[in-house]
């Protein structure tokens, strides 16, 4: 009973954190999230000590690990996942735990680890089968460096309203001032620093600051990662530049096999900014703008929390059995009700309307009956 009470309290706190974040109260959200983690961690430890049977034991450990990542306690998350995998978790749950461990590894790769970045620097990290400590398949790396260089040039050309060129090199004022310089790879992952600068002294230049170009590019890569077509069209109104950006961003991102994650870290003032590309995208999916419809839509899948922006704001995400993911929109009250199913690990069915390419505005949400559950008469 005490274990169930702690878990229930943890889910209540996580729900409150989500609501506070949605309202923009980030300080209050962090407090609720920390309390949720502490309670869920205690429930997980209690499950281990009392030899609670599977899958409850591993579900609690995984839930606590998720919360540990959310509060930034990666070491605790590693311990919780290790404890779960040391048990006898069902294979599907074990795979989820391994994926979560990979997410922690990616977070650590994104850390600067004592590297001092200038404002016109960006650290790029690649993770996947093509990567070994300090080494990577040359095509995977060099291809992405060339793509990043082209994206820097195209971003500058687009914002300077230079007529789109089908091929060839950019104008000399851009190619010379926006060159790409690389550091040596760092140990424990394939991470390199890249500096966008003039060839003269590899420093910031005057006519159009490289740090501004980098910040703009990272903004647009974030929009691309979350498939926010509306925002991306506003940022890149020209069709030729838009189509070219989508094609290049697709090449830069992960392929899901050789490279599973591509991450960027920059420094804005004294604050680290991180952009993560974790999902393969097909350029064809961005060809036509999304047109909203009032036609009812029913989807089935599992819920999870989703980091919506660099400030750490979160919402709910529905992942369907075919791998599609949608952010959920509704009133705070309805979102709070839906969040209860995250802790219960239930498959749910939602009914609503597709508000954007990646968002569903729902009216109803119901749990899917578990197999073998008795029907009430």
Image (cartoon, rainbow, N blue to C red):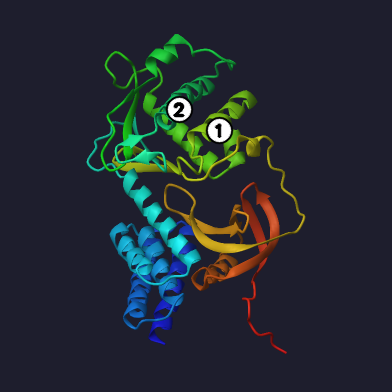
The x, y position of residue 280, in whole percent, is: 54, 42
The vertical placement of 2 against 197, above or below, is below
Q: Would you name the residue on which mark 2 appears?
A: 143
Residue situated in front as seen by the camera: 277 or 354: 277
Q: Is residue 320 left or right of residue 99?
A: right
Residue situated in front as seen by the camera: 335 or 113: 113
Helix, strand or loop under label 2: helix
Query: Which of the 4 image quadrants contains residue 26?
Result: bottom left
The vertical placement of 72 against 80, above or below, is above
The x, y position of residue 226, in whole percent, is: 54, 45
**Cα distance, mark 1 to mark 2?**
25 Å
| Dot 2 alpha-carbon crowd within 10 angstroms: few under 14, some 14 to 19, many 20 or more | few
The vertical placement of 374 against 241, above or below, is below
Q: Which mark is residue 80?
A: none
Q: Residue placed at 68% from the left, 38% from the top?
A: 289
Q: Return the residue found at the far right.
A: 295
Residue situated in front as seen by the camera: 98 or 120: 98
Q: Quadrant of the N terminus?
A: bottom left
The x, y position of residue 33, in whole percent, is: 39, 65
| Dot 1 alpha-carbon crowd within 10 angstroms: few under 14, some 14 to 19, many 20 or more | some
Q: Would you name the residue on which mark 1 appears?
A: 235
Q: Residue placed at 30% from the left, 45% from the top?
A: 111
- Frontmost of labels 1 and 2 is 2
**Residue 268 seen anywhere in this rendered image of the structure:** no
Q: Residue placed at 69% from the left, 42% from the top?
A: 290
Number of numbered tags placed on the structure image: 2
**Residue 169 seen anywhere in this rendered image of the structure:** yes
């Amino acid at each position: 009973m005490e274990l169930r009470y702690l878990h229930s309290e943890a889910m209540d706190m996580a729900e409150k954190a989500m609501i506070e974040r949605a309202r923009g109260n980030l300080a209050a959200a962090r407090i609720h999230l920390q309390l949720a983690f502490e309670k869920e961690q205690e429930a997980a430890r209690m499950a281990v000590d009392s030899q609670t049977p599977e899958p409850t034991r591993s579900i609690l450990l995984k839930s606590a690990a998720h919360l540990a990542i959310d509060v930034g306690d990666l070491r605790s998350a590693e311990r919780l996942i290790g404890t779960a995998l040391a048990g006898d978790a069902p294979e599907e749950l074990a795979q989820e735990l391994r994926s979560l461990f990979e997410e922690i590894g990616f977070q650590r790769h994104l850390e600067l680890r004592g590297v001092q970045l200038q404002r016109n620097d960006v650290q790029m990290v690649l993770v996947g089968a093509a990567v070994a400590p300090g080494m990577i398949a040359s095509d995977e790396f060099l291809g992405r460096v060339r793509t990043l260089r082209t994206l820097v040039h195209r971003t500058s050309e687009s914002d300077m309203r230079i007529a789109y060129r089908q091929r060839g090199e950019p104008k000399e004022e851009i190619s010379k001032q926006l060159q790409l310089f690389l550091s040596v790879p760092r140990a424990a992952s394939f991470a390199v620093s890249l500096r966008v600068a003039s060839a003269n002294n590899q420093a910031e230049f005057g006519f159009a600051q490289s740090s501004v170009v980098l910040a703009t590019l990272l903004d647009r890569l974030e929009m691309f990662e979350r498939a926010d077509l509306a925002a991306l069209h506003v940022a890149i109104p020209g069709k030729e530049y838009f189509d070219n950006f989508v094609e290049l961003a697709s090449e830069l991102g992960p392929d899901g096999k050789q490279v599973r994650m591509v991450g960027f870290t920059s420094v804005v003032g004294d604050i680290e900014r991180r952009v993560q590309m974790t999902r393969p995208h097909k350029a064809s999916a961005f060809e036509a703008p999304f047109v909203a419809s009032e036609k009812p839509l029913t989807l089935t899948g599992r819920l999870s929390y989703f980091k919506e922006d660099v400030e750490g704001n979160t919402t709910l995400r529905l992942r369907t059995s075919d791998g599609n993911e949608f952010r959920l929109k509704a009133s705070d009250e309805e979102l709070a009700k839906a969040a209860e199913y995250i802790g219960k690990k239930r498959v749910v069915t939602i009914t609503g309307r597709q508000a954007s390419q990646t968002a569903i505005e729902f009216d109803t949400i119901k749990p899917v009956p578990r197999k073998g559950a008795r029907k009430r008469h």
